Amino acid sequence: MRKYFLLGAVAMLAASNASAENTTYTLEAQAKVALSSKVNCTTWDWGTIYLNDLEIDNIELQAYGAEITPSGTDVDKFSDIIGYKSAVCEGISYEGSVYLPDFFVINDGGIGMRIENITIDEEYVLSGTLVLDSGGVPYDTSRTYTGSVTFTVIN
């Protein structure tokens, strides 16, 4: 009996050692350093947005140059916008690509508005959409909404 037990134990050890495999993996990495140019942009001032009711679900203000076009489910609650001034970014070369991400402007109470679909034209003027979609949270007329974004120009 002892003989068969020892043979079984040796067989199990041999089987577990036989199934072990050594695998070699190769990892390649690379990096490139490039010089970036400083781009100066003026402040994108959306001015004062006048609404007939501060509790809204969705208003989108599409800005193209100095022209503002309102839309959205609560467009009837939009009254006017005064003091709008688009940003102008100097130092951008159109020989490469410009990636401008969406970002938020937020007041000190934590309520924000998203700026999306940002583009830049040949005269370096930004256009985009300011989205007010509070989901029932009222906007505050006593607070200013601010924010900033970093973007990349690849030449």
Image (spheres, grey):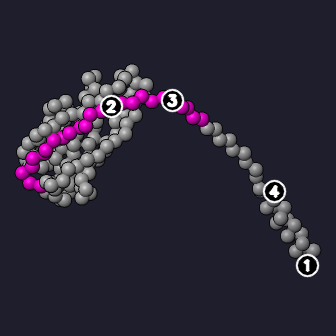
Q: Is residue 47 magenta?
A: yes
Q: Give the spatial CA distance, label 1 vs label 3.
A: 75 Å
Q: Nearer the viewer, mark 2 or mark 1?
A: 2
Residue 26, percent across and down?
A: 68, 41
* Left or right of residue 115: residue 50: left
Of helix, strand and loop, which one carries label 1?
loop
Report the quarter where the N terminus lies.
Answer: bottom right
Q: Around disc 1, counting alpha carbons within 10 Å, would you say few (fewer than 14), some (14 to 19), or many (20 or more)?
A: few
Residue 65, percent across and down?
A: 19, 30
Between disc 1 and disc 3, whose residue precedes?
1
Of helix, strand and loop, which one carries label 3?
loop
127 up-or-down from 48: above or below? above
Between disc 2 and disc 4, whose residue precedes?
4
The magenta segment: 30-54
Between disc 2 and disc 3, whose residue precedes?
3
Q: Residue at x 40, y 24 (%)?
A: 96
Please name the residue that numbered disc 2 is placed on. Answer: 40
Q: Residue at x 64, y 38 (%)?
A: 28
* Left or right of residue 104: residue 45: left
Between disc 2 and disc 1, whose residue precedes?
1
Q: Give the spatial CA distance, label 2 vs label 4.
A: 66 Å
Please name the residue that numbered disc 4 is placed on. Answer: 18
Report the quarter where the C terminus lies.
Answer: top left
Please name the residue that numbered disc 3 is placed on. Answer: 34
Please name the residue that numbered disc 1 is placed on. Answer: 1
Q: Nearer the viewer, mark 1 or mark 3?
A: 3
Q: Give the spatial CA distance, label 2 vs label 1.
A: 88 Å
The mark found on residue 88 in the picture is none
